[in-house]
Image (cartoon, rainbow, N blue to C red):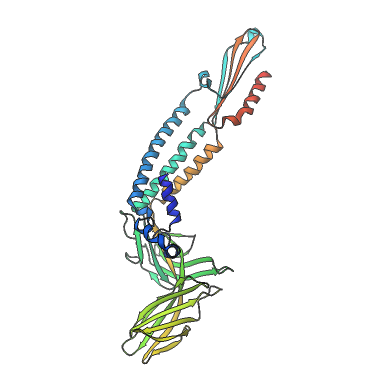
């Protein structure tokens, strides 16, 4: 129950890192009174809390005991031979006298079994649960994730410390790509409602010295060595502004992030030479193209130096002797990376879960017995049937077996 409650909270509360900054901000805006106490209690980072680890370990110990009992029982029943005494408590049993010649009447027992593999359905199912649990523990201890805002044309170097944020287990090490990754192009297709219908990114890298192209999306990751790359839902335009004039020059990118409102928009701000504070706002285009008109606000000190629309390539004199040039507009996207060496164990556990469930409900061990003994006027026939589960569903099979024996 405790683990179920913890996992329910995990799905209801956006988790730091894994849920993404946009989902975290949306939750904080929608539930301002809940966000702070949930953060203090660690409920927005459940997988990294000590109490969750202790809960998982307790569940693991309990599951190990259950597994040991189930496998011992399954192997014992698999090897156990059938005898007439095995049917003493059979739920389906019929006894009748069949007329035969005295010399033909004799004592015999025809004992049969089928579907013995059904004995291993429940143990396999719980073994799958154990493997998934172990994979989760390994991910909590050794797994590592990171995110970075990457602008079209930028290259992510194959060295430590290039990620904007990193988090992981207590025994994990930093994320390092096996080769440089260049963000070539964002592929964006909006739907009629304005939501994103398709979001993908084309990446260029190398593998064993040979060029390699990667295509990733929201639900379409790609592997690069031991690291899995994917996209979050966070993206927008990035504007390269150049500040020119007396007192020095400089250029830097200003990232515009999505903001709420009646109409989807992006906003961003930055600091530039000359004591200029810049704020940019652009409306999302319905066709997914980069915005060609943006609202620019320039502050110098506490005063408003400029406000108005600007376009790519335009140069504006915001104060005497100082110009801002909108040099270029490109897309940026939040690139996610994850390293989980136990992922194969989770997949194996999932396969065993599915296989065990199929064996539990698709197979059944069925034992039948036809036991005859001589009696006056013929022989007594005892027909019995027992099953591993769902015994009430096999009454018809007993009737068919009885009818066959009566007809002999």
Asked whether residue 225 is in view, the answer is no
Q: Position of residue 162 (x, y in %)?
A: 34, 67
- Residue at the far right in the pictured view: 407
Image quarter where the N terminus lies is: top left
Residue lying farthest front? 33
Of residues 183 and 354, which is closer to you in this image? 354
Left or right of 408 on screen, residue 156: left
145 left or right, relative to 217: left
Looking at the picture, how far across and down is residue 300, in whole percent? 35, 85
Reply above or below: 246 against 3: below
Residue 272 in which image quadrant: bottom left
Count of numbered labels shown in the rendering: 0
Q: In the rendered view, would you say 305 is above or below 142?
A: below
x and y percentages locating residue 397 in the rendered image: 63, 28
Q: Is residue 373 above or below residue 184?
A: above
Please report the residue visible at 47 percent of the width from the left and 83 percent of the height from the top: 312
Quarter of the figure with residue 169 = bottom left
- Asked if residue 359 shows in the view, the reply is yes
Along the line of sight, the residue nearer the viewer: 47 or 401: 47
If the image is split into quadrants, where does the C terminus sit? Answer: top right
For image coordinates 44% across by 30% down, the residue present is 73
Residue 52, image x, y percentages: 36, 49
């Amino acid at each position: 129950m405790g683990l179920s409650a913890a996992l329910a909270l995990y799905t209801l509360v956006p988790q730091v890192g894994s849920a993404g900054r946009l989902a975290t901000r949306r939750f904080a805006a929608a539930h301002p009174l809940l966000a702070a106490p949930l953060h203090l209690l660690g409920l927005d980072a459940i997988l990294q809390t000590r109490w969750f680890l202790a809960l998982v370990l307790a569940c693991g110990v309990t599951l190990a005991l259950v597994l040991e009992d189930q496998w011992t029982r399954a192997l014992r029943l698999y090897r156990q031979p059938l005898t007439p005494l095995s049917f003493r408590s059979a739920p389906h049993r019929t006894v009748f006298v069949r007329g035969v010649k005295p010399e033909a009447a004799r004592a015999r027992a025809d004992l049969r079994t089928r579907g013995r593999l059904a004995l291993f359905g429940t143990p396999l199912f719980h073994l799958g649960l154990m493997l998934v649990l172990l994979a989760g523990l390994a991910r909590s201890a050794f797994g590592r994730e990171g995110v970075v805002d990457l602008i079209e044309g930028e290259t992510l170097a194959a060295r430590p410390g290039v990620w904007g944020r990193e988090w992981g287990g207590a025994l994990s090490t930093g994320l390092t790509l096996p080769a440089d990754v260049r963000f070539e192009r964002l592929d964006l297709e909006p739907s009629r409602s304005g939501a994103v219908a398709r979001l993908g990114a084309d990446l260029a890298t190398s593998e064993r010295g040979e060029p390699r192209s990667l295509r990733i999306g929201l639900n379409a990751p790609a592997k690069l060595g031991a690291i899995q790359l994917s996209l979050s839902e966070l993206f927008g335009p990035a504007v390269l502004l150049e500040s020119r004039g007396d007192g020095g020059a400089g250029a830097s990118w200003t990232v515009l992030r999505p903001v709420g409102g009646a109409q989807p928009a992006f906003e961003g701000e930055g600091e530039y030479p000359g004591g200029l504070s810049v704020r940019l706002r652009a409306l999302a285009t319905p066709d997914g193209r980069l915005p060609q008109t943006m609202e620019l606000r320039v502050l110098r000190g506490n005063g408003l130096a400029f406000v108005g629309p600007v376009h790519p390539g335009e140069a504006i004199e915001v104060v005497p002797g100082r110009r801002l040039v909108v040099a270029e507009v490109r897309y940026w996207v939040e690139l996610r990376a994850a390293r989980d060496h136990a992922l194969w164990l989770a997949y194996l556990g999932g396969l065993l879960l599915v296989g065990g469930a199929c064996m539990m409900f698709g197979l059944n061990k069925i034992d039948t017995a036809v036991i005859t003994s001589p009696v006056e006027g013929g022989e007594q026939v005892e027909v019995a049937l027992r099953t591993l589960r769902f015994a009430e569903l096999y009454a018809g099979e007993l009737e068919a077996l009885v009818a066959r024996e009566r007809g002999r």
